[in-house]
Image (spheres, helix red, strand yellow):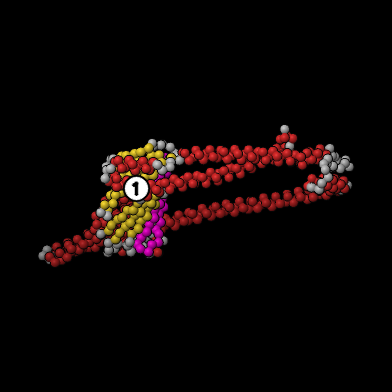
């Protein structure tokens, strides 16, 4: 009955008070529950630390001595910790001892510790210790506590809200209803009746409202006489406003047309710039190809011409004087040397053409599979073992745990091999060296950090090292296509990124790859 008598405003006030109180109750309850949860988790973490600090060494000794009875006692001691429900020891020799009941639930925390025994200054792996902690009991206690807090707070809020509604109805709502009845019976043509409330005389907000309403009534009476004049003025203003709006609309339409034309011109210009950039890049590639092929082919043509001349001299010498052994021997030597030059030039031209063909990468011919990065690095080391041994170079592979990814193994094999070849050819010119490859795992990507302790890369070469035909060994027969091929393999086939980082000691490359590459068939 009290809620019905308070009217719409009272019910809205009640609903808002309840909702706000419920919100505050939820926030404060969540803070209390969270604080309790943190205390419980901290207690669990302290138990885990005590297990790690107090039991690992002793269990390792018992497992080393194969003292199963002592291990069972130690596992029983671990189960005495709060919320620890299961403990198990597995030796490297196959011995397994467990205590407690293993729970398969999402509300358990499992910890695994490697057991090692120190003997003569060396650590020997003897097995592992598994500990399972059940958090279900913590959540049950916190749930009951949360229900009690919420219910008590809601009951208290409901009682307070009903009392507030009673006061609002007595002091405000019933007078607002009287004011509404007076306003409903008021007419513009009859403004003589003033507003009065049936209440004790007091100076408060309602009295101020009544006074303001009566003053407004008087002002309305005075304003009725000016109504016609104001209406006429309003019509004039509306007419002028329509003319202004129509004029402004015309101007905006013209401006939009100009903007559309400008945008079309910009798009056309952008298209032209892109095409020009493509042509410039193609021109640079063609010029580089022509330059690289021109040298071996030119040498081959010159050598062929010289061989023809030498052969003519040799034939003339034989026909003129078969006994001219010195001329014949000299011509034969020149023929042999020329053929060697011609052979080297033609082989170099063939290698260049092969390198150019590698640049035409086609991802559709690749097959993605799941493979281990550690095993891939072992393949690279085995494939390049002779070269590494001959140059007295070592490779160190650093990783916390083996990492398996779904990608294209053969292109990645080529990338790592090419980086090692670059280190051997450019970094370790006349000295032994060390190559360090770090495998870093993250949630969705893996990073391959490649470093060597060679002579390093100058800044002018580093900034353009992935461009085609960039090399410091031009005079040694290097084409400068290796790192360009590496860049294309990483970005276009492996769907990753590669960067050459600044380094004060040797070369430093960072490759980031997705753990699972997207393919249209997946």
Image side of residue 147 versus residue 256, left or right: left
Q: Which quadrant of the figure has residue 213? A: top right
Q: Quadrant of the C terminus?
A: top left
Can you say whether 72 is above or below 279 in the image?
above
Residue 30, horizontal then vertical, whole percent? 55, 44
**Seen from this angle, which residue lies furthest top?**
1
**Seen from this angle, which residue lies furthest left?**
323
Q: Read off the magenta span.
A: 494-522
Q: Which quadrant of the figure has residue 450? A: bottom left
- Which residue corresponds to the image point at 25% horizontal and 59% vertical from the top-left? 392
Q: Quadrant of the N terminus?
A: top right
- Which residue corresponds to the image point at 41% horizontal and 36% vertical from the top-left? 104
Callout 1: SS: helix
Residue 226, horizontal then vertical, whole percent? 87, 48
Q: Provide the residue designation for mark 1.
A: 56
Q: Say if the magenta span includes residue 503.
A: yes
- Which residue corresponds to the image point at 40% horizontal and 56% vertical from the top-left? 499
The answer to whether residue 408 is seen in the rendering is no
Q: Tell me how many marks there are.
A: 1
- Which residue corresponds to the image point at 51% horizontal and 54% vertical from the top-left? 272
Can you say whether 190 is above or below 480 in the image?
above
């Amino acid at each position: 009955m009290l809620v019905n008598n308070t009217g719409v405003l009272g019910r809205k006030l009640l609903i808002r008070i309840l909702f706000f109180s419920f919100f505050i109750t939820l926030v404060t309850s969540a803070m209390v529950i969270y604080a309790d949860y943190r205390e419980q988790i901290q207690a669990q973490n302290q138990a885990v630390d005590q297990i790690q600090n107090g039991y690992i060494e002793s269990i390792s000794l018992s497992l080393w001595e194969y003292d199963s009875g002592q291990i069972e006692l130690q596992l029983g001691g671990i189960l005495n910790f709060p919320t620890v429900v299961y403990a198990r020891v597995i030796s490297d020799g196959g011995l397994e001892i467990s205590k407690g009941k293993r729970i398969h639930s999402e509300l358990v925390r499992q910890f695994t510790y490697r057991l090692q025994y120190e003997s003569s200054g060396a650590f020997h792996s003897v097995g592992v210790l598994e500990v399972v902690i059940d958090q279900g009991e913590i959540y049950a206690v916190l749930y009951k506590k949360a229900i009690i807090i919420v219910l008590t707070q809601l009951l208290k809020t409901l009682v307070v809200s009903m009392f507030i509604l009673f006061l609002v109805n007595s002091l405000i709502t019933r007078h607002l209803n009287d004011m509404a009845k007076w306003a409903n019976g008021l007419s513009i043509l009859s403004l003589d009746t003033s507003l009065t409330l049936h209440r004790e005389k007091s100076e408060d907000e309602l009295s101020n409202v009544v006074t303001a309403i009566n003053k407004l009534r008087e002002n309305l009476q005075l304003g009725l006489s000016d109504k016609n004049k104001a209406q006429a003025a309003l019509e004039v203003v509306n007419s002028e406003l329509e003319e202004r709006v129509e004029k402004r609309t015309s101007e905006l339409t013209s401006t939009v047309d100009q903007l559309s034309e400008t945008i079309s011109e910009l798009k056309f210009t952008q298209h032209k710039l892109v095409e020009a950039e493509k042509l410039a890049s193609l021109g640079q590639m063609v010029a580089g190809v022509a330059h690289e092929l021109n040298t071996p082919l030119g040498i081959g043509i010159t050598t062929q011409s010289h061989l023809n001349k030498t052969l003519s001299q040799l034939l003339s010498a034989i026909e003129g004087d078969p006994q001219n052994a010195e001329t014949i021997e000299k011509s034969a030597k020149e023929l042999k040397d020329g053929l060697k030059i011609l052979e080297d030039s033609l082989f170099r031209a063939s290698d260049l053409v092969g390198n150019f063909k590698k640049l035409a990468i086609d991802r559709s011919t690749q097959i993605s599979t799941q493979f281990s990065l550690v095993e891939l690095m072992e393949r690279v080391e085995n494939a390049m073992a002779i070269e590494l041994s001959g140059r007295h170079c070592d490779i160190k592979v650093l990783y916390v745990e083996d990492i398996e990814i779904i990608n294209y193994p053969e292109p990645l094999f080529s990338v790592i091999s090419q980086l090692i070849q670059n280190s051997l050819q450019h970094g370790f010119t006349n000295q032994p060296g060390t190559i360090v490859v770090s495998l870093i795992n993250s949630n969705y990507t893996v990073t391959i950090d490649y470093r060597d302790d060679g002579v390093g890369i100058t800044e002018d070469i580093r900034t353009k090292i992935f461009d085609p035909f960039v090399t410091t060994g031009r005079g040694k027969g290097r084409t400068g296509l290796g790192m360009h091929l590496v860049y294309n393999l990483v970005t276009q086939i492996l769907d990753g990124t590669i960067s050459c980082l600044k380094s004060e000691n040797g070369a430093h490359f960072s490759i980031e790859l997705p753990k699972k590459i997207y393919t249209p068939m997946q």
